[in-house]
C-alpha cells in the first residue's frame, strides 16, 4: 500500500473526497504459498498491515527470482528513472505493466453487511473508487487518447465469473475487506501469469490467485485517514508504483547495502518496534524452535530486511527498502517526494500510543520531523507513471492548480473552499 516516487518539483493538488485511515498498518500481504516469495508491495492495517499488506497477490517462484536476479543485476542502473516502480519492459516471471496503463477490473460477486443492510461489493466501493480515479485525473493523469483507463466491467457477468479461469489474468479483481476491517492490498502491476488449469498438481491456484487483486477497506481510521485518498494509493499500486519510502536510495547502508553521504531513513528515523504487530512477529519467531543465535538474528532481521519481514508476515516489509534488481528507481534525486500519495504518514501501522493515537514508525529524517498524511497524488506521482509507461506527457509537468493560468484554477479554488480537510500551501 499503495500501488497505493517521482520526478523533481514540489506540487500539491487539492481535490479531497471522503475520509479514511488504518489502525495497525495499511495494506496486508496476500497469503503466500510455500514455494513462492512475495515480491509485490501493498499496504498495512487490519490483522497487522499498514496500508493493508499481509496477504500475497503476485507471487514468483524462487527459481524465477534467482534467474531474474542473475540476468538483470549487472544492468540495473540502465533501467533507473525518476520514480520507484516496475520495469518498463516485460521480464519473464516478473510482474509487468498494464498495456498503456489501461486497467480492466471486475467487482467480486459477493454481498456484505454494510451500514445495516446487505450490499454488493460494487454498491459499497464504486463511488469512492470513482472519486479516487478523479483524484488522479485532477493531478494530471487523464484517461484520454487511450491511456490510463480504469474500466470496471459491470455488463459482462460471464467474463467476471469464477468459472472464467482462462481470462482471470486479464482483469483486476476488486474485493471488499469487510465492514470495519482495516485491510487493503493491491497487486503491483500485473503479476506473472500462472497456469489456470484446475487440475494443477499438487493443488490448483484459486480464482483469486490467478490474476491481480485489489482488496479495499472503507474504514475511516486507516492510512491517510481519507477513504478516497487510500483508494487512490491502491490505484497507484495497481498501475505499478511501489511505496515512495521503500526506495533504497533513501536508506542508510545498514538497510540498503550502499554507503551514502545523505540518507533519510535508518536507525534514528525508523522505529520498527512501534509497529502494532511487532510483538506478534517476535512471538512467531520464538515459536519456531530455532537455536538461540538464529532466533535473535531473525528478530533483528525483521526490522532490517524486507525479505525476512515478509517471511514472517510482519508489516515492516511495507516500510523496508525493496532491493530486487528488476525494480526501477532514480539515484539522482535529493530527497523523497513528501507529497507522494505512495508515501506512508509517520503513524501508519503504529501500535496504540500512550495518551491516544498511534505510535510513530517513520520520520522524515534523524531530526524526528513527522511525515504528514497526503490526500491526493502529487505531480511527481503522475510524471513518474507517464515516464514508466512511456506515455504522452511523461517528461513535463502541468501548470499547478494554484496558478491563475491553469484552466482548473477556478475549480480548484471552489473545491478548496468546500473542502475542510485541504491542507494547501
Image: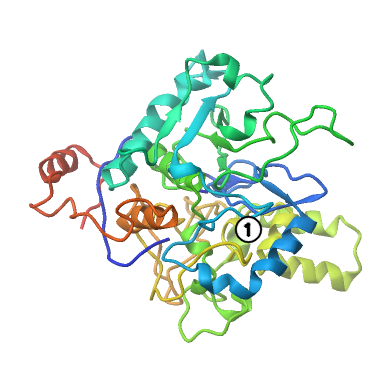
Which residue bears the numbered disc 1?
317
**The one of 111 and 22 positioned closer to us in this rendering:** 111
For residue 258, above or below residue 99: below
**How busy is the neighbourhood of tag 1: few (under 14 within 10 Å), some, or many (20 plus)?**
many
Colour scheme shown: rainbow
**The one of 95 and 180 positioned closer to us in this rendering:** 95
Query: What residue is rendered at 56% in x and 62% in y?
Result: 327
For residue 155, above or below residue 231: above
**The one of 31 and 104 positioned closer to us in this rendering:** 104
For residue 186, above or below residue 379: above
**Quarter placement of the C terminus:** bottom left
Q: Quadrant of residue 332?
A: bottom left
Q: Is residue 51 left or right of residue 293?
A: left
Q: Quadrant of residue 413?
A: top left
The total of numbered circles placed on residues is 1
Query: What residue is rendered at 69% in x and 19% in y?
Result: 163
Q: Is residue 317 left or right of residue 290?
A: left
Amino acid at each position: 500500500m499503495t500501488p497505493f516516487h517521482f520526478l523533481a518539483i514540489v506540487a500539491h493538488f487539492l481535490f479531497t473526497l471522503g475520509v479514511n485511515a488504518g489502525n495497525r498498518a495499511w495494506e496486508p500481504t496476500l497469503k503466500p504459498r510455500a514455494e513462492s516469495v512475495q515480491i509485490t508491495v501493498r499496504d498495512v492495517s487490519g490483522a497487522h498491515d499498514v496500508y493493508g499488506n499481509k496477504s500475497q497477490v503476485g507471487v514468483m517462484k524462487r527459481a524465477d527470482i534467482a534467474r531474474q536476479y542473475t540476468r538483470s543485476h549487472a544492468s540495473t542502473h540502465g533501467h533507473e528513472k525518476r520514480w520507484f516502480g516496475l520495469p518498463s519492459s516485460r521480464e519473464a516471471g516478473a510482474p509487468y505493466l498494464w498495456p498503456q496503463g489501461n486497467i480492466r477490473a471486475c467487482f467480486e460477486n459477493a454481498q456484505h453487511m454494510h451500514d445495516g443492510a446487505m450490499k454488493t461489493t460494487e454498491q459499497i466501493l464504486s463511488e469512492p473508487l470513482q472519486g479516487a480515479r478523479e483524484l488522479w485525473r485532477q493531478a494530471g493523469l487523464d484517461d484520454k487518447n487511450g491511456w490510463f483507463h480504469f474500466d470496471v466491467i459491470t455488463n459482462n457477468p460471464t467474463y467476471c465469473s469464477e468459472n472464467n479461469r482462462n481470462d482471470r489474468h486479464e482483469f483486476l479483481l476488486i474485493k471488499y475487506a469487510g465492514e470495519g476491517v482495516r485491510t487493503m492490498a493491491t497487486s503491483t502491476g500485473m503479476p506473472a501469469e500462472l497456469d489456470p488449469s484446475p487440475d494443477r498438481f499438487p493443488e490448483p491456484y484459486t480464482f483469486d490467485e490467478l490474476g491481480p487483486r485489489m482488496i479495499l477497506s472503507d474504514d475511516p481510521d486507516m492510512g491517510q485517514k481519507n477513504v478516497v485518498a487510500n483508494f487512490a494509493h491502491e490505484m497507484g499500486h495497481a498501475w505499478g508504483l511501489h511505496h515512495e519510502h521503500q526506495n533504497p536510495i533513501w536508506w542508510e547502508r545498514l538497510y540498503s547495502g550502499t554507503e551514502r553521504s545523505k540518507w533519510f531513513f535508518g536507525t534514528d528515523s525508523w522505529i520498527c518496534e512501534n509497529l502494532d504487530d511487532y510483538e506478534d512477529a517476535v512471538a512467531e519467531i520464538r515459536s519456531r524452535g530455532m537455536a538461540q543465535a538464529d532466533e535473535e538474528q531473525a528478530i533483528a532481521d525483521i526490522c532490517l530486511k524486507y525479505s525476512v519481514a515478509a517471511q514472517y508476515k510482519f508489516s515492516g516489509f511495507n516500510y523496508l527498502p525493496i532491493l530486487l534488481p528488476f525494480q526501477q528507481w532514480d539515484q539522482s534525486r535529493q530527497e523523497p517526494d513528501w507529497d507522494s500519495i505512495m508515501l506512508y504518514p509517520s503513524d501508519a501501522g503504529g501500535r496504540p500510543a500512550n495518551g491516544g493515537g498511534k505510535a510513530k514508525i517513520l520520520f522524515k529524517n534523524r531530526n524526528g520531523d513527522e511525515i504528514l498524511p497526503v490526500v491526493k497524488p502529487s505531480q511527481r506521482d503522475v510524471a513518474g507513471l507517464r515516464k514508466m509507461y512511456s506515455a504522452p506527457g511523461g517528461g513535463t509537468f502541468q501548470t499547478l492548480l494554484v496558478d491563475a493560468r491553469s484552466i482548473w484554477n477556478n475549480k480548484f479554488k471552489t473545491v478548496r473552499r468546500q473542502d475542510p480537510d485541504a491542507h494547501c500551501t
